[in-house]
Structure formats: C-alpha cells, structure tokens
Amino acid sequence: MMATAFALKKPQIKTELPGPKARSIIEADSQFVNPAYPRPAFKLVAQRAAGVWVEDVDGNLFLDCNAGVAVCSTGHCHPEVVAAIQEQAAQLIHMCGTDFYYRQMPELAEKLDEIVPVARPTKTHFANSGTEAIETALKLAMHATGREKFIAFFGSFHGRTLGSLSLTSSKIAQRIGFKRQALDVVHVPYPNDYRNPFSAEDCGDGGAAQGGLNWIENRLFKTTTPAEEVAAIVIEPVQGEGGYVPSPKGFLSGLRRICDEHGILLIVDEVQSGMGRTGKMFASDHYDLKADIVCIAKGIASGLPLGACVSRADLMDWKPGAHASTFGGNPVAIAAALKTIELLERELVANSADVGAYLKSGLEKLKDKHNCIGDVRGPGLMLGVEFVTDRSSKQPDPELRDRVEMASFERGLILLGAGPNSIRWSPPLILNRENVDVALEIFDDAITSSR
Ligand SMILES: Cc1ncc(COP(=O)(O)O)c(C=O)c1O
C-alpha cells in the first residue's frame, strides 16, 4: 500500500478530514487519554509511515514536514534503523544500565564524545527524553558549582517536569496551576534579530546580541542576581517552541565569555536543534561554541525514546546514586541512535544543509509574494516562517498562522506552529528537492486561501 502511495510522490486526500476511522479514534482518545496534550486544531490519526510520507487510518497520504516534532531525523521507519532495532531487540532489550553493564552504553557515549560541542573529554548520562536530559544538567550544575540560581530565556522550552518547567517560558498554559517555580530561575528576553526586545540603550551599537549580554551583565548581575551565585545559563542556540528563532551572531560567544569570567556553567539545549537538524551536527557548530554541558534527545534515535546529557568529564564528579535512570540508555534505543548517527554522518547532515538552503530560498520567494510573511529564518531544515498582518507593521497574526496550518493539512502537508505566530519546518532530514517543490506549492496555495 505504501509502495503504491510512494509512487504518487504527492499527498492524496481521499476522505473528509478527519475521516470516519480517525473520528472514532479521536473520540476514544478524548475519553481515556490525558487532555493536556497540546494538540493542534487539525487532527491527524497516523497508521503507518515511510520516509517523508505518513498514511492515516482512512488511507489519506500526507507529506510530513514536521517529523513527529523534529524526531524522525532519518525519516519514518528508515530500513537500516528498523533492521538495527530488530536485530538488537532479538538479542537484549533491557538490562538496567544503572546496575549492570552492556556494550552499547560506552559505545554511544564514546561516539558522542567525538561529535558533541563540548570540550573533550566528556561523560554522558543516558535518559529517555529531553526533559530528563535537562533535569540531569540542572542537578549536575548545582552539584558541580555548589550554586543554585539559573538564567534562562523568555520563549524557551526545556520540558515540563518541575525542574525544567522552571526554565520553560514559551506559553502560559505550561505554567498555570503549578505554583511557584521549583528552581530559582530568572529569565532574560531572547535576542531576536527580527523583533529586537532590547532598547537602543541596552544594545549600544551591537544589536540584539549586545542587548542581551548587557541585560545580563548590567541589569541582572547588578540588581537581583549576583553572578557568583549563578550555577548555569541555559540556552537553546536556535529557539524551538518559541518560534524557530536563531540566536544572533556574537550572542553565544558573549555568553561563553560571561560564564568563563564568573565560574558559571553554560548548558546548551540541543534537544530540538541537534542531530543534523540545522545542517551541521549541532546548532552550536554554526557558532563555534563549546558548552560545558549539552542536552540531546528528539532526533538522536529516529523515534525511539532516548535523551543524553553530555558534560565535561571533570564536572561529572558525583557519587554512585546521585543520578540514574532505569530505562535510560536502553540497548534498543542506543542501537537506533548508533545507526541514526551513522546515517547522519554518511549523508543526512549534508542533505539537511543542501535541501534546507533550497527550501529556504523557496520560502523567501513566497515571502516576496505574500506580504503576510514577515520573516523567514533558520539554518538547515530548522526553518521558521513568521506571519504578520503586513510586513511594515510587523503586527503578529496568530489566527492567520493557524489557518495556514489547517489549510496545509487539508491539502496533505503536515506542518506545525511554533511560537505565537510562526510555522516551523522540521521535516525528516531525507527530504529531497522534489518533496520541497510539492510542499512549497501546497504552502503557497494554503496561504493564498487563508488570507
Ligand atoms: C529545546 C527542547 N528542550 C527540551 C524539550 C523537552 O523534550 P521532551 O518532550 O522529550 O521531554 C523539548 C521538546 O520539545 C525541546 O524542544
């Protein structure tokens, strides 16, 4: 069935959306499943998927430019990843790395030591998700520095468990009802070149990047937040859930300098931006940045649950029992990760850069055509398109964004919003130029029909 559908090379919508089978599953879901999942207005009920194609339960075929929220880096069910999973599952599924040993853990940790943007040597803690990788980084920073304050950024998303939630600040729904922050975190506006949040006085002649650095050094450190009490600064090099906003040139190197001057650790959250998504293995590589601790999850294992907190080896000077996870670093997930990294290094990081540039130039042409596109931004296949009422006023238009998201879906293109008024493009890294042409034609039509 998928093979026939593949040959079409175009989405195919055969039923109303959601179709009859999809509707009954959505109904059961609304009865039994956690209603706090932040599902979008369009309803996709997936049945199976291959490459960049997803088939729903009613036989509709979609071109996927979201990849399960930036997770299926090698595409859906890449045959080599499936084979690696199957082979490993037949040999050893679980052994609990907290208490026993198996070869996959040091194998992946050694590979990460080679590729992560952290000064070597490193050590790795294995977790199951992004938020757990962040929790590890927070605990480790407190343990290693003996300090307990953190600096994070508005618009950031680092997870929803209580520690990471103290950092997260992209939507109020994530915070309502959960009382005060578990951790002592102060937030700084994220420097955004399109919407510079800082005053001319803050920026001097250095733009948003300098504004952000001055905010930390001249405001925080001189008022509420003594530098010598800060354990770590936590940052996404390209803000993900906040709207696919790349940090401006000079900002991350400035943070590195501030951290070095004050004995503060720099924690870089590469959960969404890592593993080839930006056209380099890590977004930090675009900025020549070396963090003290890097957190990875999402794309690392092509869809199996795996998170990693990779740190300078000297920082992981904690005793047995201080931090561990029953499932973290499960051998099957690691087998998927090792194969994913092999594919990324073989061809997919390069493809992300190449096809990403092609997609970006197509989106820029659409920006010339549609005055409601305020900004097209991002590296590789981590591209944001921001919708505004018109380009001169830059007035955000979240309703238009939502309509475009829905109209794209109705035409067979899976795209998801990010931030208040942007669409994120985070396709599988196997996307090719032909797929891009199909996607852009649909997106263009979706915008025209939504205005
Ligand atoms: C940058 C970033 N950090 C952390 C997380 C949390 O990851 P998880 O949902 O796997 O806990 C996310 C999830 O979207 C993310 O984008």
Image: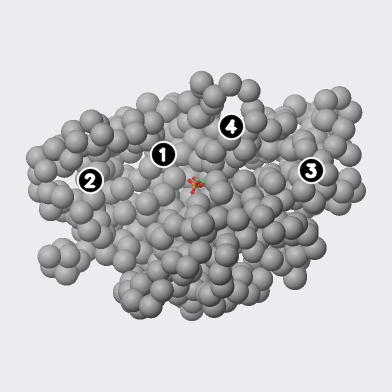
Q: Three-letter amino acid code at disc 4?
A: Ser
Element type where label 2 sits in the image: loop
Q: Is residue 249 left or right of residue 414?
A: right
The answer to which of marks 2 and 3 sits earlier in the sequence is 2
User: In 3D space, how far apart are the residues under numbered discs 1 and 4 (Cα atoms)?
Assistant: 16 Å
Earlier sequence position, callout 2 versus callout 1: 2
Look at the numbered disc 4 and give the secondary structure of its residue: loop
Judge from the rendering whether residue 210 lies leftward or rightward of residue 276; answer left or right.
right
The CA distance from mark 3 to mark 4 is 19 Å
Whether tag 1 and tag 4 are in contact, CB under 8 A, the answer is no
Q: Residue at x 41, y 60 (%)?
A: 304
Q: Determine which of the numbered discs, if any, sits on residue 231 in the image.
A: 3
Tell me whether the residue at label 2 lies in contact with that at label 3, contact meaning CB atoms closer than 8 angstroms.
Answer: no
Q: Amino acid at mark 3?
A: Ala
Residue type, label 2? Val
Q: Are marks 1 and 3 in contact (CB under 8 Å)?
A: no
Q: Residue at x 37, y 55 (%)?
A: 67
Residue under circle 1? 417
Q: Which residue is mark 4?
A: 169
Q: Are marks 2 and 4 in contact (CB under 8 Å)?
A: no
| Left or right of 281, for residue 367 | left
3D distance between C-alphas at marks 2 and 4: 29 Å
Q: Mark 2 highlights which residue? A: 45
Which of the two residues, 425 or 316, is positioned nearer the viewer here? 316
Structural distance between the alpha carbons of marks 2 and 1? 18 Å
Q: Earlier in the sequence, mark 2 or mark 4?
A: 2
Tags 2 and 1 touching, CB below 8 Å:
no
Q: Residues within 10 Å of mark 2 (few under 14, many from 20)?
A: some
Discs 3/4, front: 3
| Residue 314 vs residue 103, the one in the foreground | 103
State the image coordinates of residue 21 (x, y, percent, origin top left): 11, 43
Residue at image coords 42%, 28%: 398
